[in-house]
Amino acid sequence: MTDLVAIGYRDLSTANAARDKIMDLQRQGLITVRDTAVVECQPDGKVKLHQSSSAAAMGAAGGALWGGLIGLLFLAPFIGMAVGAGAGALAGKATDMGVDDSFMKDLGRSLEPGTAALFLLVDQVTVDKVMAEMAPYNFGGRLLHSSLSMEAEQRLRDAIDAAHLTRV
């Protein structure tokens, strides 16, 4: 089951550092995330999305590869790559998988200017190890939204609260 978690931070750099740590934990096999994004409420109040990967870019790369291979059959690999990249980019843009952009922007509008939020779409997590590794990023954070069970959400809130208490 995939869960959505959004944690607010007091600035963009902390949200980015937390996302980088999550990606490091994914490389270690402690968490599997389907999508990550950081939403920034800029000082002027505008909301900006910082996506971890572009579906259009991934589609273009895949399309170029397949287009090139198919182009080899017709002795026109470069034309095949160009057509494949264009088609792949369009298909990738149309099938944006992950956290819904409009949902992130809506939640981003509720943030105070100068703050940011980290959105995670989590497939699997080793809770105790990830909580321990993320403890330094919990200070200043607050849970904005989750699709976790009541028990799991409370554990996350407790971890964030504990980070606040140890820093005071």
Image (cartoon, rainbow, N blue to C red):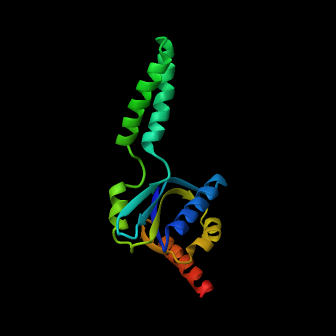
The residue shown at (41%, 25%) is: 83
- Foreground of the two, 84 or 28: 84
Where is residue 91 drawn, in percent x and y?
37, 36
Q: Position of residue 90 (x, y in %)?
A: 36, 36
Whether residue 3 is situated above or below residue 145 in the rendered picture: above
Can residue 30 be seen in the rendering of this structure? Answer: no
Q: Nearer the viewer, residue 153 or 78?
A: 78
Task: Give the residue furthest to the right.
Answer: 28
Residue 148 in percent (x, y) is at 45, 66
The structure residue drawn at horizontal position 55% and vertical position 61%, both measured from the top left corner, is 19
- Check the image and report above or below for 70 versus 149: above
Which corner quadrant holds the C terminus?
bottom right
Q: Nearer the viewer, residue 73 or 10?
A: 10
Residue 41 visible within the image: yes
43 up-or-down from 1: above or below: below
| Residue in view at x 47 percent, y 14 percent | 76
